[in-house]
């Protein structure tokens, strides 16, 4: 049936098969519009005009796109066209209407402590009720009872392997390190140490000899069971070298050399020559050493080295006078080591509040002391970064702000250990306002009492050292050998606690440069800094740290029966 029906359908209409429906795009209606009968064109004339206009735009766009595709390099010029258009646009705008970008210095990069002091002074003066001296130290040594024992040698000293002559260079405490290291090396090599010679330096300009600063007789007696020490090289030895020390073989030893180097390189030459010279000798022995070597270092530093009678006598008088001036606080006083001398200020390359005059003065001081060091090509000095990194020396004003903020009242007696302060009259005035009981060796002692020491920098430094050792609180404001030795000496004397405030100077730079900080907020943060120093004061020695700063009891109290304890026998 289906086949029959299809056959009938195909035979109708003259036998033609009907076509499928025509495309709407190309249908008869569209063609009739183009070919146009008058009636249809008249009815749709407006629509036909729009179609013709749209076709022209499309054809133009296709032509441009085809041209660009054929010339792809044109796309490389598109960014230039964009930039040119933007420049033309910006040129048509008045610069007065463009907002300005203000660059502010980083917090902590500028010296604004005088402005902070002026703003907070009234609140500071009103807050004088608490006194930190009564409560400053709360932590105790964690290892139980701190016994800084230095056991006596249990062996007889064998025949000496020869004589060692060293030249101790530097200032007071660098020379002190050289002496102690020389004792340790001589004891380890079973050598006889000649009392060290102090090398005269153009910076310190102090011709003092060993006996001018230290009690030579006490030094010899305290070491007699551990290390042989003589005051000069025997004549029969000097005859071999024509009585001229310049003929003696001089070792040039690298800084921080291990003790094993002395055994391997120095000992054979010592036995061969019977006298050797080591110059210079500062920092020529590694901090890390066997316990027997550390024991000798501690024995020399804390027991054998005692200041000479004239220095000790005057120091005791000054300590007594400081305690009298601090009677309201049971004789307790604070000692501050302030490094704000001209050479220190110049070397730091920091900027303070002296303007162009300060810049010219410090530039001249740098050129005098370190000719060309700070002006060589390629050297870039960034005072702001130096301050933010905590490398600028604290000014007297900043020391006063810090101590008042830490809770020390204005009736606290302060001993200031320092050289000649840079622009002292101006810079010391605010510190004296905050602490009117401040003293120095110059104000405590009479001119007659100081006269034998005045032209000798190391002897003056020894007086400061002695008064600082006996203070209830020691404040260090800058690094160096002076505070490092004092920290260790105070640990040795005060049951393992250094009783020292070592401020976070990076944090101080930010606090003193804060334009909106109030007195209560500043004080809270500075009291926390003081508490942190209390906790740090009982820290134990870590690897590669100086035994002079961290006199570890374990290092000093170990048995002398270790292999490193026995002196090396003469060959």
Image (cartoon, helix red, strand yellow):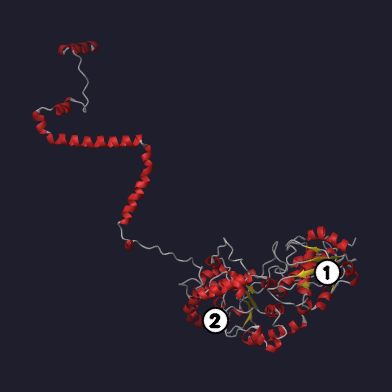
Say whether residue 226 is visible: no
Name the side, left or right, on which 265 lies relative to 503: right
The residue under label 1 is 245
As drawn, 438 above or below 71: below
Image coordinates for residue 380, horizontal then vertical, percent? 55, 63
In this rendered view, identify the residue nearer to me: 542 or 468.
468
| Precedes in sequence: disc 1 or disc 2 | 1
Name the side, left or right, on which 205 lies relative to 20: right
In this rendered view, identify the residue nearer to me: 438 or 237.
237
* Neighbour tally class for label 2: few under 14, some 14-19, many 20 plus, Cα within 10 Å: few
* Neighbour tally class for label 1: few under 14, some 14-19, many 20 plus, Cα within 10 Å: some
Name, please, the residue furthest toward the left.
39
Marks 1 & 2, CB-CB < 8 Å contact: no
Q: Residue at x 48, y 76 (%)?
A: 115
Image coordinates for residue 23, horizontal then vertical, percent? 22, 25
Q: Quadrant of the N terminus?
A: top left
Image coordinates for residue 529, horizontal then vertical, percent? 57, 71
Give the numbered dot on residue 231. Answer: none
């Amino acid at each position: 049936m289906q086949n029959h029906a299809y056959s009938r359908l195909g035979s109708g209409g003259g036998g033609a098969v009907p076509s499928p429906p025509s495309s709407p795009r190309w249908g008869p209606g569209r063609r009739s519009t183009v070919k146009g009968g008058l009636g249809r064109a008249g009815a749709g004339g407006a629509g036909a005009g729009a179609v013709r206009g749209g076709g022209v735009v499309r054809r133009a766009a296709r032509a441009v796109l085809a041209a660009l595709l054929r010339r792809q390099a044109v796309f490389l010029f598109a960014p230039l066209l964009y930039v040119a258009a933007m420049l033309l646009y910006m040129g048509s705008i008045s610069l007065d209407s463009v907002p300005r970008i203000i660059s502010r210095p980083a917090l902590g990069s500028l010296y604004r402590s005088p402005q902070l002091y002026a703003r907070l002074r009234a609140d500071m003066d009103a807050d004088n009720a608490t006194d930190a001296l009564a409560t400053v130290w709360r932590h105790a040594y964690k290892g139980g009872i701190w016994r800084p024992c230095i056991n006596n040698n249990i062996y007889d000293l064998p025949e000496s392997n020869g004589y060692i002559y060293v030249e101790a260079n530097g200032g007071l405490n660098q020379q002190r390190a050289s002496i102690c290291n020389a004792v340790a090396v001589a004891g380890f090599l079973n050598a006889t140490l000649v009392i060290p010679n102090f090398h005269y330096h153009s910076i310190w300009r102090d011709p003092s000899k060993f006996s001018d600063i230290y009690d030579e007789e006490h030094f010899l007696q305290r070491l007699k069971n551990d290390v042989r020490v003589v005051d000069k090289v025997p004549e029969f030895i000097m005859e071999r070298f024509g009585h001229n020390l310049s003929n003696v073989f001089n070792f040039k030893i690298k800084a921080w050399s291990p003790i094993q180097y002395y055994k391997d390189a120095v000992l054979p030459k010592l036995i061969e020559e019977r006298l050797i010279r080591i110059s210079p000798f500062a920092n020529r022995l590694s901090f890390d050493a066997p316990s027997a070597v550390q024991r000798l270092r501690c024995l020399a530093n804390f027991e054998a080295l005692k200041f000479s009678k004239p220095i000790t006598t005057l120091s005791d008088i000054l300590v007594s006078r400081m305690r009298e001036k601090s009677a309201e606080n049971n004789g307790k006083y604070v000692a501050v080591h302030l490094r704000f001398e001209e050479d220190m200020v110049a070397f730091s390359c920091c900027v303070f509040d002296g303007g162009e005059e300060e810049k010219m003065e410090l530039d001249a001081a740098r050129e005098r002391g370190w000719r060309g060091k700070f002006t060589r090509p390629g050297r870039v000095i960034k005072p702001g970064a130096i301050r933010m990194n905590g490398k600028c020396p604290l000014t007297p004003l900043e020391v006063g702000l810090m101590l008042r903020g830490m809770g020390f009242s204005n009736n606290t007696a302060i001993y200031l250990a320092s050289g000649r302060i840079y622009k002292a009259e101006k810079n010391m005035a605010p510190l004296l306002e905050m602490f009117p009981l401040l003293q120095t060796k110059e104000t405590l002692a009479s001119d007659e009492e100081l006269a034998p020491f005045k032209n000798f920098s190391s002897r003056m430094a020894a007086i400061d050292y002695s008064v600082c050792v006996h203070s209830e609180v020691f404040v260090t404001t800058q690094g160096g050998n002076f505070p490092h030795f004092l920290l260790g000496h105070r640990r040795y004397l005060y049951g393992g606690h250094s009783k020292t405030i070592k401020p976070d100077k990076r944090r101080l730079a930010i606090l003193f440069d804060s334009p909106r900080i109030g007195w209560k907020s500043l004080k809270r943060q500075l009291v926390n800094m003081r508490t942190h120093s209390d906790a740090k004061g009982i820290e134990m020695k870590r690897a590669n740290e100086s035994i002079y700063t961290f006199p570890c009891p374990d290092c000093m109290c170990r048995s002398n029966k270790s292999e490193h304890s026995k002196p090396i026998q003469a060959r």
